[in-house]
Amino acid sequence: MDHTGPVGQAGQEAAARRTAGWAALPDLLSKGFLTELSDEKFQLASSVYHLAGMRRPTAEESAAHPSVRTTASSGFEFRADAWAQWKDAATPALRRHAESVEYCALCALPPERVAAPFMRPAGNKFFSRNTKVTYGQWKDAHPDRGPQAANFTVAFRAEHGHGPSFRQLGEGLGWPGRPVLGFIVQRLLSNDWLTSTGQVPWTLRPGQAAQEQGITLPGSRRSVTAVGSHQP
């Protein structure tokens, strides 16, 4: 069969575009342009919506519904009354920790950004083959990622009074965005360069491997393990 006609040529061109697109995926993921949904499904990252003509709600639109807001990245629907109820039901230590993040003048995060990781159920994070390939390429160029991450958590906690989020850690060190960043932090936790209090957000701190190299919280300040579980 002759594939050199217009139809055959169009098919070859489409295949070439797909090949070029797949080759560009690691770079697009590492630079935060795309968010990975599965091995073969991706969507534009919320941080670059403006490049596609998508806009965030105006201040007037947000003010019209102040108690109900949706975070663009997770789809989490924030309700002020539900957030207050969650804090009322939390342990005293967990509430203090959540409010230390919520009222941190340096972080200056909107309440929905703080509430989302505390309130939504923790699930198993899927990391696709593309994410792992991108991570493999990235880690070869960052042999000191463990000590760097541990030192960053010490400095961050000294300034803020709580640990960094995954995003704050990545942005502070100039590392790739999601989903690659999530896998980076998972590996640092697995290799004991970092540790956290279960699934409680903003509790990253030096792990055992870092402590063995002298990277510790100053004066072994009070443990944050008292923060408690992720659920109130």
Image (cartoon, rainbow, N blue to C red):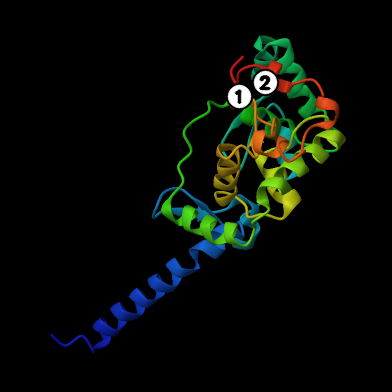
**Drawn side of residue 221 relative to residue 188, left or right:** right
Label 1 Cα crowd, 10 Å radius (few <14 / some 14-19 / many 20+) = some
Name the disc covering residue 83, or none: 2
Identify the secondary structure beneath mark 2. Answer: helix
214 versus 79 height, above or below: below
**Residue found 45% across the figure and 56% down from its top:** 130
Disc 1 residue type (three-letter): Met
**Quarter of the view holding residue 190:** top right
**Drawn side of residue 132 relative to residue 158, left or right:** left
176 versus 74 height, above or below: below
2 vs 1, front mark: 1
Alpha carbon distance from label 2 to label 1: 8 Å
**Residue found 71% across the figure and 55% down from its top:** 174
**Residue found 58% across the figure and 53% down from its top:** 45
Name the disc covering residue 119, or none: 1
Where does residue 85 sit, x and y in percent of width and height?
Answer: 66, 13
Identify the secondary structure beneath mark 1. Answer: helix
User: Which is more N-terminal, label 1 or label 2?
Assistant: 2
Task: Classify the position of the N terminus by image quarter.
Answer: bottom left
Task: Classify the position of the C terminus by image quarter.
Answer: top right
Where does residue 168 sit, x and y in percent of width and height?
Answer: 72, 43
Disc 2 residue type (three-letter): Trp
Name the disc covering residue 74, or none: none
Where does residue 142 sit, x and y in percent of width and height?
Answer: 65, 58
**Residue found 63% across the figure and 30% down from its top:** 116
Between residue 8 and residue 37, name the one nearer to us.
Answer: 37
128 versus 159 height, above or below: below
Where does residue 157 sit, x and y in percent of width and height?
Answer: 81, 34
Between residue 113 and residue 183, name the one nearer to us.
Answer: 183
Label 2 Cα crowd, 10 Å radius (few <14 / some 14-19 / many 20+) = some
Query: Are dots 2 and 1 in contact, CB under 8 Å?
Result: yes
